Amino acid sequence: MASSPEAASTPTSHTSQNDCEIALNGTDAMQFSLKQIEIPAHCTQATIHLSHTGKLPKTAMGHNVVITSQAHLRGVLSDGLQAGKEHEFVKPNDERVLAHSKLLGGGESDSITFDTALLKTEPYVFVCSFPGHSGPMRGTIVIQ
Ligand SMILES: [Cu+2]
């Protein structure tokens, strides 16, 4: 009765980073699955896995995720529009952009990893920079 074949402990080294990874979906209805991304305070880096769960091509309903500060959001979006589809609506080497994914069409996915240090200094947001999407497709990033 005292001895059990069940493993009393399981290794945790492979799961300890999991809460620093966030799954985010974009849909054909021009929505993200999250309005807020919460990153645990112990994460020095965070990863966002973006999936376009729709069917529409990226020319019609492209989605990306761009991480920038609230203060720089407007400038990042307007410069992204100017950069155009050739640059997937993100100004190349934009220092205001902490990280951004590729532009995805239906069924595609991409992941981005970034340091969280700056996120603790001022409000940051995530947004899709495809033309017309930044209104509904944006949210705040919270370190908790
Ligand atoms: Cu979009």
Image: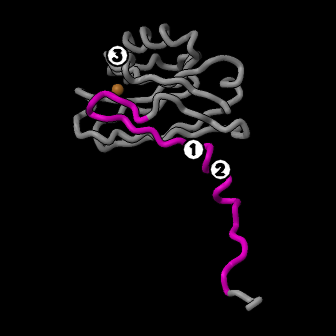
**Which of 25 and 83 lies nearest the eye of the viewer?**
25
Q: Residue at x 71, y 36 (%)?
A: 41
Q: Residues within 10 Å of mark 3 (few under 14, many from 20)?
A: some
Tell me the quadrant of the picture where the C terminus can be found: top right
Residue 91 place in picture, x, y as percent: 46, 16
Residue drawn at point x = 62 percent, y = 18 percent: 123
Give the magenta range: 5-33
- State which tag comes first along the sequence, 2 or 3: 2
Amino acid of disc 2: Gln
Q: Which of the two discs, 2 and 3, sits closer to the camera?
A: 2
Which residue is pictured at 35% across the width and 29% down the height? 31
Q: Secondary structure at mark 2?
A: loop
Rendered view: 116 above or below 75: below
Q: CA distance from mark 2 to mark 3?
A: 36 Å
Quadrant of the image where one finds ligand 1:
top left
In the image, is residue 10 above or below residue 95? below
Type of amino acid at the residue the image marks with label 1: Glu
Which residue does the numbered mark 3 point to in the structure image?
Answer: 84
From the viewer's perspective, is residue 143 above or below residue 136?
A: below
> Does the segment drawn in magenta span residue 24?
yes
How packed mark 1 is, by other alpha carbons closer than 10 Å (few <14, some 14-19, many 20 or more), is some
Closer to us: 106 or 40:
40
Horizontal relation, residue 60 to residue 94: left or right: left
